[in-house]
Amino acid sequence: MRALRPIRNIDAGDLVEMMLVVAVVTIIIIRVSLELSGYPQLGGSGLHIAHVLYGGLLMLVALILVFALLNISARWAAAFIGGVGFGFFIDEVGKFVTNDVNYFFEPAFSVMYVVFVILFFALWAIRRASIGPHDALANALSLLREERDGALDAETKREILALLGRANPEDPLVPVLRERVLATPTTERRNVTPYALWRARLAEWYQRKAEQSWFSTAVLVIMIVYGLGSLGTVVSPLTDGRGVDGQSEDFATWFETGSAGLTAILIAIGLAVRRRSRVAAYRWFKAAILVSLLITQ
C-alpha cells in the first residue's frame, strides 16, 4: 500500500487565519451579549442547552460543506462557519476543566489564550511550508474549476500561470494547461470573499498611514513607552518588598518578569539599530511584541 502523499493547499494559511479571526470575534460577541442580557439560559424543566452544542453543530456543518462541495468558495464558507463554531465551543472551556462546571472559571481565559497561541504557531508553520511542483500543479487544476461560462478573472489567471511556472515543466499537463489559460477570455473579478476584501482594504489603509511622516515617530514613541512599561514589570517584584528574597513571589510572577525583561531588551536593541536600519529596528520591535503577546500575556 502506497503512503499517502499530502498535497498542500495554497489558500490554507488564509483559511486558517480567517477561522481564527472569526473565532476570536465570536467569543467577544458571546461574552458581551451574555453580559448585556444577564446570562439567560435556553431550556427548561431542568434542561440547559449550552452554546457549546451550537459550536459542535456549526463545525459539523463546516465539515459537510468541505466534503460535499468542490468550489473554492465553499472552503471559505466552511472556514467562516467553522470559526464561529469553534468560538462557541472554546468559549465554554471553563465548564469542562472544573468539577462544578463553572462557566465563569477565571483561568478559562488563559486556556483560551494558550489554545489560540498554539493555533497561531500552527498558522505560522502552514504559511512557511514550501510548495513543491506537484502541489503547484494540483492547485492550478483546483483553480481551473472556478472557470465559468468559459472565462476566468484576471487575478485567477495570473495565479494559475504563476503556479504552472512552479510546476514540473516536464509534466505533459503543464504546457496544455498554460495554453488553455492563456486562451481563456478574461472577465471581471469573481469569488472575492468579504474577508479578503476587508483584509485588502485594511492593508491599503495601513500602507497609506505608514507612508506618512508621523508614522515612524508614532512607532518610536509607542515602543519607548512599551519598553518602559516592561521595565516596570521587571523592577516591580524587586522593589515592592515582597520579592527581594526571591521567596515570596510565585513562579508565574518571575516568569512574567523574565519575559517582560526580554521584551525590554528586544525593544532596546531595536532602538539601538534604528539609526542604521529602520527595517531592522522594526523587526526587533516585532519580536518584542510577539514575546509580549505569546509569553508575557
Image: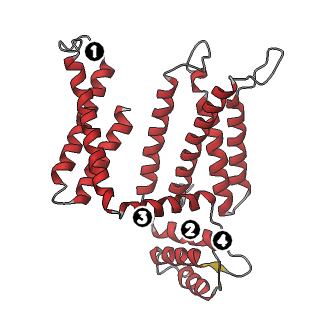
**Mark 4 or mark 2: which is in front?**
4
Q: Secondary structure at mark 4?
A: loop
Which amino acid lies under the numbered mark 2 shown in the image of this protein?
Answer: Asn
**Residue 190, disc:** 4
Disc 3 designates what residue? 208
Instruction: Find residue 202 and report its horizontal and vertical position in percent.
Output: 50, 58
**Mark 4 or mark 3: which is in front?**
3
Q: Is residue 292 left or right of residue 124?
A: left
Instruction: Find residue 257 and report its horizontal and vertical position in percent.
Output: 26, 27
In this rendered view, identify the residue nearer to me: 100 or 286. 286
Are the residues tagged 3 and 1 within 8 Å (C-beta)?
no
Mark 3 and mark 2: Cα distance apart in space: 33 Å
**Mark 1 or mark 2: which is in front?**
1
Residue 8, can we see it? no
Q: Secondary structure at mark 3?
A: helix
Residue at x 71%, y 31% (from the top left corner): 53
Mark 4 and mark 2: Cα distance apart in space: 18 Å
Q: Secondary structure at mark 1?
A: loop
Which amino acid lies under the numbered mark 3 shown in the image of this protein?
Answer: Arg
**Which of the two discs, 4 and 2, labels the residue nearer the N terminus?**
2
**Which of the two discs, 3 and 1, labels the residue nearer the N terminus?**
3
Callout 2 crowding tier (Cα within 10 Å): few <14, some 14–19, many ≥20 = many
Disc 2 designates what residue? 139
Mark 1 and mark 2: Cα distance apart in space: 54 Å
Mark 3 and mark 1: Cα distance apart in space: 46 Å
Q: Which image quadrant is residue 191 in?
A: bottom right
Residue at x 47%, y 49% (from the top left corner): 123
